[in-house]
Amino acid sequence: MGGDGANDGGDHMKDAGLGLPEGASQMTLPSFTLESGVTLTNVPVGYSTYGRLNARGDNGVIVGHSLTSNSHVHEWWGEMLGDGPGFTMNTLEEFVVCVNYLGSPYGTASPITPADGEDAKKPYGARFPTPCTIRDNVYLQKQVLDRLGVTHLRLAIGGSMGSMLALEWAATFPDFVTELVLIAGCGRHTDWAIGIGEAQRFSIMADAKFKGGQYDPKDPPLAGLATSRMMAMLSYRAPRSVDERFARGVMENPGECADERVEKESADVVSVEGKLGGTLVAEPKPRAATAMRKPSSHGDIGCTAHANESASETLPYFAVESYLQYQGKKFIQRFDANCYIQLTYTLDSHDVARGRGAYEDVLRRLTHRTLVVGITSDVLYPFSLQAELADLMPNAEMYAIDSPHGHDAFLIEIKELNKAIARFRRGERADPDAARIANQFPGGAAPRSAPREDVEGKTSLTIPFGGVGRRPDENENENENASGSSLAVLETLTEGELRGAVRALERELEKSRAREERQARRADALLAEVARLRDEASSTAKTLHPRLEDDSVSLASSFGYGLRLVPANPPPSARRYQPVYGEVKSPANGADAPIAALGAF
């Protein structure tokens, strides 16, 4: 059952403890077959719901949680969930569902649940099938939604691992989902992230108590799991954030005080701050403090750092070390080692293009209205990964969180994130600063050019910092007024707001230019292919009609078909949803390889 959330120690999870959290629901599926071919029976699935399903069942929202969260959205994204249009998930109008993942210890089938769902049997433990993929989870969640009566999803949203789930929803059931919000994720798990996960897994497996996963639940590999969490915490933050928070500070003991009350008040303490973690707070001391001795052992997790206790006396006990140890020890109270390993393997399975074609092509086929959110300081899933999604998905908008806090910024900067997503869902630009700048700089892709539309009907924007682009029909006074108002807008923005807005606009420009280049290359390839086919057809026609000295006889009269004529500038809808020339295969051997046009006739 869930634990007491009062002492959450800065963890984004308020409900500590294993098992289905209090207030969550659970259903049992008779059977479920994984991609690996393994079939689970009597499958428990934990989930949480908010709001009401309408009569048509088409007001659903699916939320993907992060790696170690449970299905209680209100515990970790409470500011984004509520009644009214000011919330990302409006529970007055939408039915919000969050389903716990396979392999997680919070209510769904996992290493800690009884095998085959039978209470008389021992938990799966190491026998739980590996891996349970992101795609497995989407298929499982589809069965849950079907049972709940959901016929359509207005939105699939998630952060980190949850964004991977939301993206997979769109690829697996494209007609079932309308909009996507993908936060701090990626289209496929990178080697960098896989490597980080393997290092965390290995720290657990190297614990002597792990025993290949067949450990006694009463004596689990706590040291390995705590170490894994410490490593993960560093990947969730960023160097600048950690350096500024701790500043090479060391833990200190209070000075000698005769009055016990004064001594207590003068001690340094670690306090909980915000959603994540504690920070060292130095209270005023009546007397000089002494450096705290670095622990030579951690009996609560069975770890001995130095057999010779005196060896640690000369080592400084840095505040960052104390913080990480605290987070590791707190984590083992609410998680299981086998479950953690399973979920990291689930992350590694993520590749939205697996079995579907070329990665870029798969993303380009996802035409859902999408908001991609990236964090500029993220070291786990760098900003470039989200920019890649926004570049390739045809109807995607980029929003940048310019925060020093790294990957976990999506759990820290929640209020501003909620405002941005709520704007997006209302049909507005997610970044109001980018919108304000764009409105003040209505020029085209470069200074001194009018707004231009790309091949899909979108307007490309840039910020000409040397001054506002001049239009042919503008006089000098209008130009000066526009420039003055534009600069006034810029001056009202903070450095962070301006940087985030500029990043978003730059990504939009890059996306437009990349799309234009792709279309130009495609057009060149198609023209070359059409010319080749025409020459080939003409040669064949002359062979069939040897007396022809010219091309006066129609090719159509010689064959049962001819080249289909298409408008020189077909409408955007035809270009976007019904490619005039059919599919164009990507070059197999690089950009200079010949491209074959299919369906040209």
Image (cartoon, rainbow, N blue to C red):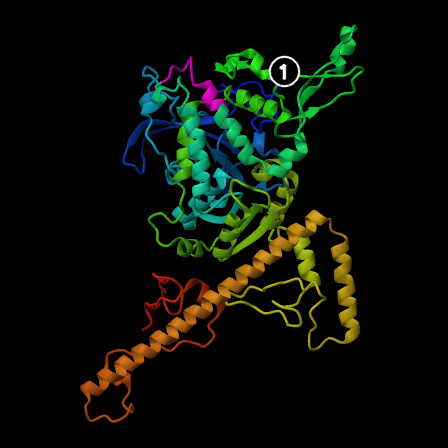
At x 40%, y 45%, the residue is 351
- Quarter of the image holding residue 590? bottom left
Q: Residue 489: horizontal and vertical position, in percent?
A: 75, 57
- Is residue 471 something that shows in the picture? yes
Is 554 in front, or is 218? 218
At x 32%, y 16%, the residue is 121
At x 46%, y 65%, the residue is 518
- Quarter of the image holding residue 467? bottom right
Q: Which residues are magenta?
A: 215-226
Amino acid residing under circle 1: Arg
Position above or below: 568 against 228: below
- Is residue 124 something that shows in the picture? no
**Horizontal placement of 294 versus 66: left or right?**
right
Residue 219 lies in magenta, yes or no?
Answer: yes
Q: Secondary structure at mark 1?
A: loop
Position above or below: 468 against 5: below
Q: Residue 23: horizontal and vertical position, in percent?
A: 52, 24
Q: Which residue is mark 1?
A: 293
Q: Residue 14: horizontal and vertical position, in percent?
A: 58, 25
